[in-house]
Amino acid sequence: MGKPVVYGADYSVYVRIVRLALEEKGIAYDIVPVDIFAEGGAPAWYGKHHPFGRIPAFEHDNFRLFEASAIARYVDEGFAGPALQPTDPRARATMNQIIGILDAYAYRAMVWDVAVERLEKTEPDVALIANGLRQAETVLKVLTSLKAQGPWLLGNQLTLADLHAAPIIAYFVKVPEGHNLLTQFAGIWDLYLRMAGRPSFVRTEKA
């Protein structure tokens, strides 16, 4: 089989999710840089890889995918290496539920409304940050309630849910408000520190 190709940029949470899956499976891959925030947006050729002009996109032996969750599941199921999804149907459903929660409720609040607003705006919108922190607190409460006993969200097995959560949290803890809130949820804080120490996480840090 040929080497997979990831299209995207190292600043992207969702590109990092895909790269973490590849790293944890031990799969060599190539990255083709695509900066959707460049002047003029993504290059015209990228439309054949992602019709909505977002990142990441993925290609493997002439098979193309976009949407990080779909790519990560393909990586887990299509390649040898440690399994990143539980076989038990209830545990697998919980994993998918957590990923859905992160996409629907955590990403916008933690990354854009809190971290990006605080770090990149000359005059941050304090009301937006406050709303983001309230949403983030709800997310962290729910994750705490869903987390199984053990080092990872699903217990003793590292899964795609952990790989989905960690890059979002990594942005969130860049700002004091995010760091301070996360440390109030010891189980999730410990999980993040455990993930942050893994070689896969270090290798996918933004340059």
Image: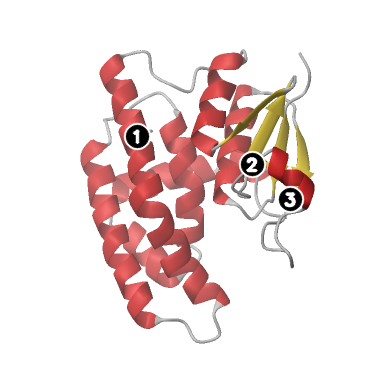
Q: Residues within 10 Å of mark 1 (few under 14, many from 20)?
A: many
Q: Nearer the viewer, residue 111 or 104?
A: 104
Tag 2–tag 3 contact (CB < 8 Å)? no
Distance of label 2 from label 3 (alpha carbons): 11 Å
| Image coords of residue 24 (percent x, y) | 59, 28
Image-based side of 196 in relation to 50, left or right: left
Q: Dot 2 lies on which element?
A: loop
Q: Residue at x 56, y 22 (%)?
A: 74
Q: Amino acid at mark 2?
A: His
Q: Earlier in the sequence, mark 2 or mark 3?
A: 3
Marks 1 and 2: which is nearer the front? 2
Q: Dot 3 lies on which element?
A: loop
**Residue assigned mark 2:** 50
Vertical position of residue 92 compared to residue 87: above or below? below
Distance of label 1 from label 2 (alpha carbons): 30 Å
Q: Nearer the viewer, residue 51 or 67?
A: 51
Vertical position of residue 81 compared to residue 102: above or below? above
Q: Residue 199: tell me if it is visible.
A: no
* View extreme (bottom): residue: 123
Count of numbered badges drawn on the protein: 3
Looking at the rendered image, the quarter that the N terminus falls into is: top right
Model colouring: secondary structure
Vertical position of residue 195 compared to residue 149: above or below? below
Q: Which mark is residue 34?
A: 3
Q: Residue at x 78, y 42 (%)?
A: 32
Q: Residues within 10 Å of mark 3 (few under 14, many from 20)?
A: many
Q: Nearer the viewer, residue 184 or 114?
A: 114
Q: Earlier in the sequence, mark 1 or mark 3?
A: 3
| Image coords of residue 49 (percent x, y) | 69, 38
Q: Residue at x 67, y 33 (%)?
A: 58
| Image coords of residue 101 (percent x, y) | 33, 44
